[in-house]
Image (cartoon, rainbow, N blue to C red):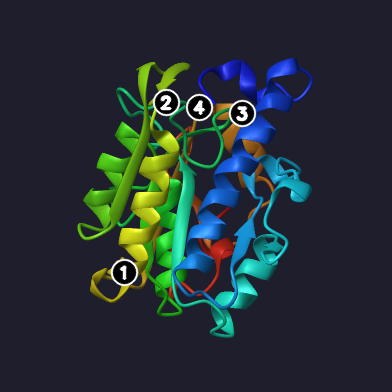
Amino acid sequence: MTDIEFMDRTGEKYALGRKLLSHSIDLAVKTCFDAGAKTVYYLDGHGGGGNVLEELIDARAVKCDIPTWQELLRTGKVDCQIELGSHARAGTVGGFLDHTLSSKLFFAYKINDVEMSELSMHALVATAHGVPIIACIGDEAACRQAKEYIPEIVTGAVKHADCRNLAQDYENADEILVGAVKKALANRDQISLYRTAEPAVVELTYYRTDMCEHTYAHCGENVTRVDARTLRKTVEKINDYYDLKF
């Protein structure tokens, strides 16, 4: 994707975006198998899924959803994870389509006073089960940011942002992607887990007061309202992706 119009599921660019995403996933999958992987899973998770054209993905790969991903982590069926199509966290200058989980609702997500990206939140869940995130494939800002959380992570910047809603792909993006995946797999034992102190204090700041109010009305007693737009809770131990959500 190179502009925000690719996000419109009713538009012509979305169909092209699905093909481009599927092509990138297929490249990563084939690279993993070529490196000796016995099983490769891929997660079609953006916006609830439905973005990947399964017929364009190597038939040896197994598609999963978020609950299945978590079960794979819990049962020790994955030994490393690659983040493909990463974006910088919400509020990042120079980040293409910067956001954290929701570009429409969430202004900032913090855990123990550290602003989170989607990659770092995924990493905390994976860490709970001893699984490292070994590679970040995305725009320049997302890749720089990934190293803030996991210094040893291998990055593959395949595009750069002209502004928040417009980016330029690099001509050798496929080569960059394949090279990053190969390097990450070859060095996965040297890439550390991303940890945070526990119990962990999780804070979510919404764009508007009413958005915060709507969620707070449905929260349990463990959630407090810090101010007009911010909710807070304490998680004794992070085991599950939904431990970090409200």
Q: Amino acid at mark 3?
A: Asp
- Residue 70 position, x and y percent, is 60, 71
Cα–Cα span, label 4 and label 2: 19 Å
- Residue 232 seen in the current view: no
Q: Which residue is mark 1?
A: 186
Which of discs 4 and 3 lies nearer the camera? The answer is 4
Q: Is residue 206 above or below residue 82?
A: above
Secondary structure under tag 3 reads helix
Q: Note whether 232 is above or below 199 in the view shown.
A: above
The residue mark sitting in front, 2 or 3, is: 2
- The residue mark sitting in front, 1 or 3, is 1
Query: Can residue 150 be seen in the rendering of this structure?
Result: yes
Q: Quadrant of residue 141?
A: top left
SS at badge 4: loop
Label 2: how many residues lie within 10 Å, few (<14), some (14-19) or many (20+)? Answer: many
Q: Which mark is residue 96?
A: 2
| Residue at 25% over, 40% down | 144
For marks 2 and 3, the one nearer the N-term is: 2
- Give the Cα distance between marks 1 and 4: 41 Å
4 or 2: tag closer to the N-terminus: 2
